[in-house]
Image (tube, rainbow, N blue to C red):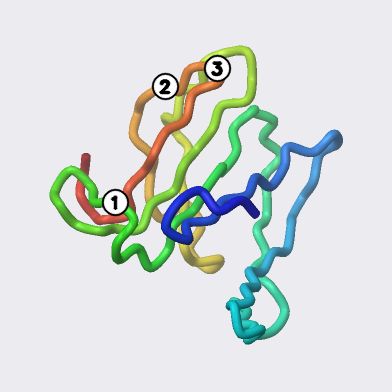
Amino acid sequence: MQNTNRNHYKATIGPWDKPVKHISIYLEATDNTGKTTREPLYNGYTVEFNEVTIPLCINEVMTSNTSIFPDEHGNYSDWIELYNYGKNLILLQGISTSNSLGKPGKWALPSITINPGEFLLLWSDGQPK
């Protein structure tokens, strides 16, 4: 992972050279004293993919944001950054996200487009925009 600033780390997962149905991930960090922590503590988070072949990836995720940078309302909300690594624009209409495996499609993404090579930051603050 790359330390971008103020201990804000990022990594890219995918794209893969062949279709995948799911991935399992966990985060592990070690401080200067050698103490290690892991999230989740056991196993990993499993992310399942539908058979959709669009060149869109979750480039970065910020959870428990308390000081990195505020949203347009001045709050330090969690966020997700999407990236279009394809050659055509992507319309987000009909695509959704969730923080619960039991409730897929919990939040519909805004009906906007992401141009090729473009990043889009989505705030997880409950605000419509």
- Helix, strand or loop status at disc 2: strand
Q: Earlier in the sequence, mark 3 or mark 1?
A: 1
Residue that badge 3 annotates? 116
Number of other residues with Cα within 10 Å of mark 2, as a class: few under 14, some 14 to 19, many 20 or more: some
On the image, the x and y values in percent for residue 42 come to 69, 84
As drawn, 76 above or below 50 = below
On the image, the x and y values in percent for residue 38 come to 63, 79
Q: State the quadrant of the C terminus.
A: top left
What is the spatial separation of the Cα atoms under label 3 and label 2, in whole angstroms? 10 Å
As drawn, 51 above or below 3 = above
Of tags 3 and 1, the one toward the viewer is: 1
Name which residue type carries label 2: Thr
Number of other residues with Cα within 10 Å of mark 1, as a class: few under 14, some 14 to 19, many 20 or more: few
What is the spatial separation of the Cα atoms under label 3 and label 1, in whole angstroms? 25 Å
Of tags 3 and 2, the one toward the viewer is: 3
Residue that badge 1 annotates? 69
- Helix, strand or loop status at disc 1: loop
Identify the residue at image location x=72%, y=79%. Answer: 43
Residue that badge 2 annotates? 113
